[in-house]
Image: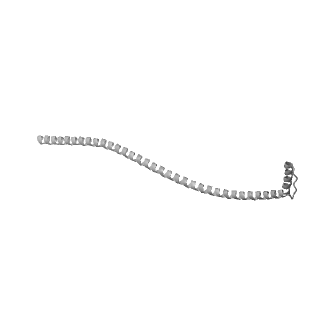
């Protein structure tokens, strides 16, 4: 501290051309001023530290809030995506069922036509067989 006072006495003498003694009241004011500056700096540092803690607390709350909101948005997006996928799958299943139904109807129509043709052929064969049996019976009756 005495080094600072010596430096101050030299600075006053150099700038203002005035010799100041160590017991001069101006140096007492300088000492008081230095003490007030130190206390003020300490108080400001304490306030800055408290502000830093408050800011960190707010930052942590914002981080947690942002994380919660992001999770909610993500969950909502996933639910919407799942719903859209379910709807697309349902539409695809309906289209496939409709196409399969059309193919089955076409195949059944073809088989039904062939079955009618086979039935008609069977009836004609039956009629021909009946005529043949009748002809054989008539021939056998006439020959007897």
Left or right of 99 in this view: 41: right
Q: Residue at x 63, y 58 (%)?
A: 57
- The front one of 6 and 130 is 6
Residue 99 percent coordinates (x, y) = 37, 44
Does residue 62 lie above or below 139 as drawn? Answer: below
Q: Is residue 144 visible?
A: no
- The front one of 132 and 52 is 52
Does residue 124 lie above or below 39 as drawn? Answer: above
Q: Residue at x 12, y 42 (%)?
A: 141
Quadrant location of the C terminus in the rendered image? top left
Q: Residue at x 54, y 54 (%)?
A: 69
Q: Quadrant of residue 127?
A: top left
Left or right of 34 in this view: 88: left
Does residue 36 lie above or below 95 as drawn? Answer: below
Q: Residue at x 76, y 58 (%)?
A: 36
Left or right of 117 in this view: 143: left
């Amino acid at each position: 501290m005495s080094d600072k006072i010596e430096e101050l006495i030299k600075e006053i003498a150099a700038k203002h051309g005035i010799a100041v003694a160590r017991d001069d009241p101006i140096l007492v004011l300088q000492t008081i001023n230095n003490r007030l500056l130190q206390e003020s700096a300490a108080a400001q540092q304490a306030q800055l530290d408290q502000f830093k803690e408050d800011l960190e607390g707010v930052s942590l709350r914002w981080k947690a809030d942002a994380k919660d909101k992001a999770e909610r948005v993500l969950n909502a997006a996933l639910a919407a995506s799942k719903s859209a996928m379910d709807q697309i799958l349902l539409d695809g299943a309906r289209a496939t069922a409709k196409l399969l139904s059309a193919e089955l109807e076409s195949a059944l129509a073809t088989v039904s036509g062939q079955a009618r043709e086979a039935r008609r052929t069977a009836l004609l064969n039956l009629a021909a067989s009946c005529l043949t049996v009748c002809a054989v019976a008539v021939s056998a009756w006439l020959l007897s």
